[in-house]
Image: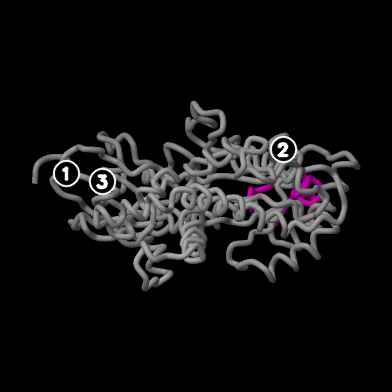
């Protein structure tokens, strides 16, 4: 069965990885009984914001997810996160927790690299000033490449001899070596297609192997660069430098500690704040807007009032949000994740057997990778159960080889039985 997507968070000590993870996994405002963490203490549940199908059919008021939440057509969907600890220079040589770091890393489908954009922590996470955080970005990639290249090149002679003896294809030979990194034959094939290599594998030079490993790293470990601590005065020049060196589409600016603070104050009844929004309302703001009760909010003390005003100016109004929600959205974007809504009735979009008693719609949502077929979704949801046929929205039958995309074949009902 296809497994759920897994997104790994990496970052050196004191970069803000733990704060980012906490801000992504704060389920205090979510509806449903989804566990905060799984059996593995390194794994947690984050919430990806998507546009729900309920808005498409104007039934948002009846959308009640089993897990996560949905407010006015904006749905928070659970997604599994992995806290990858132990990133230090020389990880591929086993320094620090290097072996465990790389072993954990291989399970991830995509990475979120939390980088201290302020430059106030050095390579080992110690307090400093003026450190160049672009070094950390290159350093993570070099550790992964060195790890994979070292393992491959160490036995390259034996690999070539076996490749010739069994008359294997390049994809077959490389997949046998890369499977330990969580790769698939499709990932290896895409890697080689992008390189367009002409010479056979047995004639590859070390330079060619380097190119293959670098391309494989890009394909297997797509990475979002989360530039954290954007509220620090030193962050601007570092952000400008990194933006010139990296693909702008891979960068998200964020302030995890600001998001955590705002959610805490909202939960305690001091402010009105919707996560991911650029707006924060205090009691004084709402009174000024004509609400004599101030929305029932508590009075802020001077310290917290000043902190919120500074946060508005330095983060929310300047960048549009704390950026935390955008971090997960960007990871989902580079993976091409598609939300699919399994229902029992494709006309009413309900899921319960007793529809008259339960009018709630779109109770469930699963995330599948781009280019997934209806059959792939069926296996993910139904396992090995025999499927007689599949219905899409409006009761129209859908072929199992059709691709699911947003707005097309993303509302499905699986009828169990023999065709």
Task: Specify the quadrant of the image occupied by residue 125.
Answer: top right
Residue 32 visible to an observer of this rendering: yes
Front residue of this view, candidates 235 and 325: 235
As for residue 145 lying within the magenta part, the answer is no
Q: Residues within 10 Å of mark 2 (few under 14, many from 20)?
A: some
Front residue of this view, candidates 158 and 129: 158
Establish if 84 lies above or below 240: above
Tell me if label 3 and label 1 are in contact, CB under 8 Å: yes
State the CA–CA distance, disc 2 to disc 3. Answer: 40 Å
Q: Which residue is rendered at x = 64% and y = 48% of the image?
A: 274
Give the number of the disc on residue 264: 2
Which residue range is magenta in the image?
Answer: 273-296
As for residue 284 lying within the magenta part, the answer is yes
Q: Nearer the viewer, mark 1 or mark 2?
A: 1
Give the number of the disc on residue 387: 1
Reading the image, the residue beneath label 3 is: 378
Helix, strand or loop at mark 1: strand
């Amino acid at each position: 069965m296809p497994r759920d997507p897994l997104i790994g968070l990496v970052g050196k000590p004191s970069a803000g990885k733990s704060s980012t993870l906490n801000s992504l996994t704060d389920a205090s405002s979510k509806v449903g009984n989804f566990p905060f963490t799984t059996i593995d203490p390194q794994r947690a549940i984050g919430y990806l914001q998507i546009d729900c199908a309920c808005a498409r059919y104007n039934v948002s008021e009846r959308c009640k997810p089993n897990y996560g939440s949905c407010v006015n057509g904006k749905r928070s969907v659970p997604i599994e996160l992995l806290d990858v600890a132990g990133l230090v220079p020389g990880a591929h040589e086993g320094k620090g927790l290097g072996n465990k770091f790389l072993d954990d890393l291989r399970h991830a489908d995509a990475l979120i690299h939390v980088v201290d954009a302020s430059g106030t922590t050095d390579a080992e996470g110690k307090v400093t000033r003026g450190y160049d955080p672009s070094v950390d970005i290159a350093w993570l990639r070099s550790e992964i490449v060195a790890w994979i290249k070292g393992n491959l090149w160490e036995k390259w002679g034996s690999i070539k001899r076996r490749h010739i003896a069994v008359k294997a294809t390049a994809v077959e030979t490389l997949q046998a070596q890369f499977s330990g990194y969580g790769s698939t034959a499709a990932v290896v094939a895409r890697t080689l297609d992008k390189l367009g290599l002409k010479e056979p594998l047995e004639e590859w030079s070390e330079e060619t192997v380097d190119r293959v490993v670098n391309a494989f790293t890009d394909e297997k470990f797509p990475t979002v660069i989360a530039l954290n601590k954007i509220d620090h005065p030193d962050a601007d020049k570092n952000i400008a430098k990194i933006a010139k060196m990296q693909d702008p589409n891979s960068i998200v600016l964020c302030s995890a500690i600001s998001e955590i603070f705002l959610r805490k104050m909202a939960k305690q009844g001091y402010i009105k704040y919707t996560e991911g929004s650029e707006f924060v309302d205090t009691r004084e703001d709402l009174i000024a807007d004509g609400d004599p009760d101030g929305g029932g909010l508590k009075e802020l003390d001077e310290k917290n009032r000043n902190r919120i005003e500074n946060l508005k100016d330095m983060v929310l109004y300047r960048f549009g949000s704390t950026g935390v929600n955008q971090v997960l959205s960007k990871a989902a974007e580079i993976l091409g994740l598609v939300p699919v809504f399994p229902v029992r009735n494709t006309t009413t979009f309900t899921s319960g057997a007793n529809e008259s008693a339960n009018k709630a719609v779109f109770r469930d949502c699963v995330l599948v990778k781009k280019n997934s077929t209806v059959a792939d979704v069926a296996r993910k949801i139904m396992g090995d159960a025999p499927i007689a046929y599949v219905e899409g929205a409006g009761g129209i039958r859908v072929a199992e080889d059709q691709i699911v995309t947003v707005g097309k074949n993303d509302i499905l009902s699986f009828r169990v039985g023999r065709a």
